[in-house]
Amino acid sequence: MRLLLLAASLGFAAIGHAADDYKFGPDSVRKDSVPVGKVTKHSWTSKVFPDTVRNYSVYVPAQYDGKTPACVMVFQDGGSYLNEKGQFVTTIAMDNLIHQKAIPVMIGIFIDPGTVPNADGKGGRSNRSFEYDTPSPQYATFLEKELLPEVSKTYLLRTDAAGRGIGGISSGGICAFTAAWERPDLFSKVLSHVGSFTNIRGGDVYPGIIRKTERKPLKIWLQDGANDLDNLHGHWPLANLQMAAALKFMKYDYRFQFGDGGHNGKQGGVDMPASLKWLWENTPPAPPIVATTTGGK
């Protein structure tokens, strides 16, 4: 209760549901009149994170024509965001919102964390915490040098930051923020669900760094709940309140949806349509493609 009062006193959106009592709205439900996008599954062996392999999926809306560069939304823990029977029904929301023209035509890239395979090729060690919780540019480099170019071999993607967003849950949430913070030339929009801005690998430094760094051209949606985690790494609700306060102090374009839920995607999943519409509103069109020519003497 004290956290909810603190959030309200700071001007942040406090949600008054009973604990985790979040229900999907109409934009999160399949409709016969709405075209369904296509999802393809792939795997990738990384050089930026050596010896790791990962699965990823690409969502392409029915409205993509292959002629106009599409916006891009990258999700960490991609399998969770793709599961239409789970807490996030992301592609359903994207289908509905693109059909309504409430968000631009966009391609979704849903990436799972890397795994270091065992010698026998069966199972392996997850590289998730190293990739997601470390405050460094390495994950942004992985996207820039590997995954985005790979997807671009098949689909015409926007290359400007205004046409790219990135999101994730828990450690994937801080990962999304880190990628955009380190490389605002690559991503301009951040979606963080119950983000782990705690001391798992030093991520609790962000509120202080935000306050002492010139404002970056980022638009940020944070979500957390008063009953989120409290453990040896830190206190998730307080960490997200600190993040929101720092963003407010530095006059960022941000939203903080603070509810009463726990460490899950229930509120974030229900809010997915609203968060996508807010993040992508007023997105400028893709810059013109400049033709390049080569010549010789």
Image (cartoon, rainbow, N blue to C red):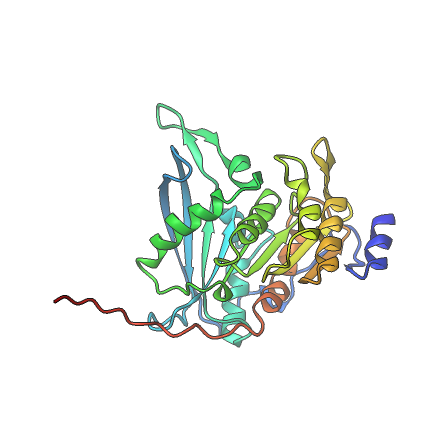
Quadrant of the rendered structure where residue 294 is? bottom left
Quadrant of the rendered structure where residue 26 is? bottom right
Q: Residue furthest front?
A: 297
Horizontal side of residue 229 vs 29, given as left or right: right
The residue positioned 52% from the left and 65% from the top of the image is 94
Q: Residue furthest top?
A: 119
Horizontal side of residue 175 vs 252, given as left or right: left
The residue positioned 67% from the left and 62% from the top of the image is 252
Q: Nearer the viewer, residue 19 or 51?
A: 51
- Location of the C terminus by quadrant is bottom left
Q: Residue 196: give x, y in percent of width and height.
A: 65, 43
The residue positioned 46% from the left and 70% from the top of the image is 105
Q: Residue 263: give x, y in percent of width and height.
A: 68, 44
Q: Can residue 261 be seen in this view?
A: yes
Quadrant of the rendered structure where residue 124 is? top left
Whether residue 297 is situated above or below residue 2 in the rendered picture: below
Q: Residue 249: give x, y in percent of width and height.
A: 75, 58
